[in-house]
Image (tube, rainbow, N blue to C red):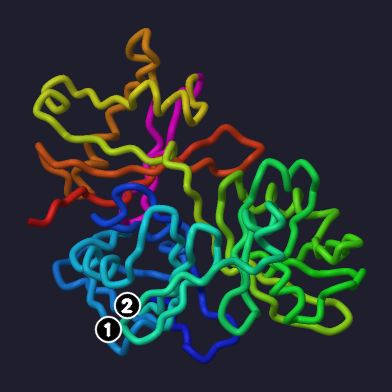
Amino acid sequence: MENVSPSSPINPHFFQPLLPGFHSYLNIPMRFFLRHIDGPTNEDNAVVKLRSDVSDITWQVKMEGRRLTKGWKKFAASHDLRVGDIVVFRHDGGLLFHVTCFGPSCCEIQYDYDDVIQISSDSDSENNQNIADEGSSSDHHSCFVARVTASNLRKDSLFLPRGFSRSNGLMKRKCEIILLNEDGIPWKLILSHKPDGEVYIRLGWRSFCFENRLRVNDVLSLKLVQTGTTPVLQLCSSSTTSQNRFLTLTLKPYNLKKYKLCLPGTFVKANGIERARKITLVDQYNIKRTTSLKPDDKHGKMRLGKEWREFCYVNGVNIGESFKLEIIKETEDTATHLLKFCSKVVNFP
């Protein structure tokens, strides 16, 4: 695990929108997991500790691979989490996270003792769809949640929440602003505003998203790390609501007997790999194996090459067990795809 001090200026964060079925488990985003969590995490004693502002309780949740499982349901119920909410995990070192919860409108849920109260939107935000869709202010007014949309990519601009802009002295300003990605690489954009006071960044937003492989519906955590003549925004983390890139397979006796494991046609089509003839398998130890892809039937199903057997063996997948995969495009300018092992699917009683 990367050593991160809770007092550091920018603790790593990740966001997850809550989709139907979220009570059963929650996945840690692949990029965050690979960067900040090191070593095996699928052991029986791998436990994540979650804290929040709702009480002084520390919830212990079992972690299998990237998945938070046993104990997560109790945490979700205690915080009255619902489909459409967004949870923000701040990494406080070790396997300790502080969790902040946002409602469907991206307004932070605040807690008063044991009651969970949803704060209504700022009236300015309610009157502007872009702000409602793209962000809201968070703790200490230095962070906000943004969403990549087809509209803001097309317009090459991103609106900032009014509360965030007002609290940080960005209203009515026109100047250069620096946007840093998670690696600290800077992009120069323009901070501007409309006559009605709406603040936005432009001329570089589309390029930033493209270069950092951010797609429509990705949810971002942005933090203001420097004010002054040239403000600086830092991308803390991102996650996506798209489920097309995830696939759950079950290893059956038929697969081993026929030496055959296939990707469903719907998955193949959704991820644009109909014409691909190779794909790279990435196991839980981040070891890569390139294997072939061949059409299997007229419905678009694709058969993996023989390397899938060693891939399943290394990941400890036995007959009758299910496992989850994630497809990742290496870069936007190539057709190379990775098929990454996420975790085995385990149901607790």
Can I make out residue 183 in this image?
no
Residue 46 appears in which quarter of the rendering?
Answer: bottom left
Identity of the residue drawn at 44% across and 54% down: 84
> Which quadrant holds the N terminus?
bottom left
Helix, strand or loop status at disc 1: loop
Residue at numbered disc 2? 50
Residue at numbered disc 1? 58
Callout 1 amino acid: Thr
Other residues around mark 2 within 10 Å, as few (<14) / some (14–19) / many (≥20) = many
The percent coordinates of residue 58 (x first, y second) are 27, 83
The percent coordinates of residue 101 (x first, y second) are 44, 70
Query: Does the CB distance between marks 1 and 2 fall below 8 Å?
Result: yes
Real-space Cα distance between discs 1 and 2? 6 Å
**Which residues make up the magenta segment?**
275-292
Residue 235 appears in which quarter of the rendering?
Answer: bottom right
> Where is 258 relative to 280, above or below?
above
Identity of the residue drawn at 47% across and 88% down: 6
The answer to which of 337 and 291 lies nearer the viewer is 337
Which of pointers 1 and 2 lies earlier in the amino acid sequence? 2
Residue 203 appears in which quarter of the rendering?
Answer: bottom right
The percent coordinates of residue 289 (x first, y second) are 37, 41
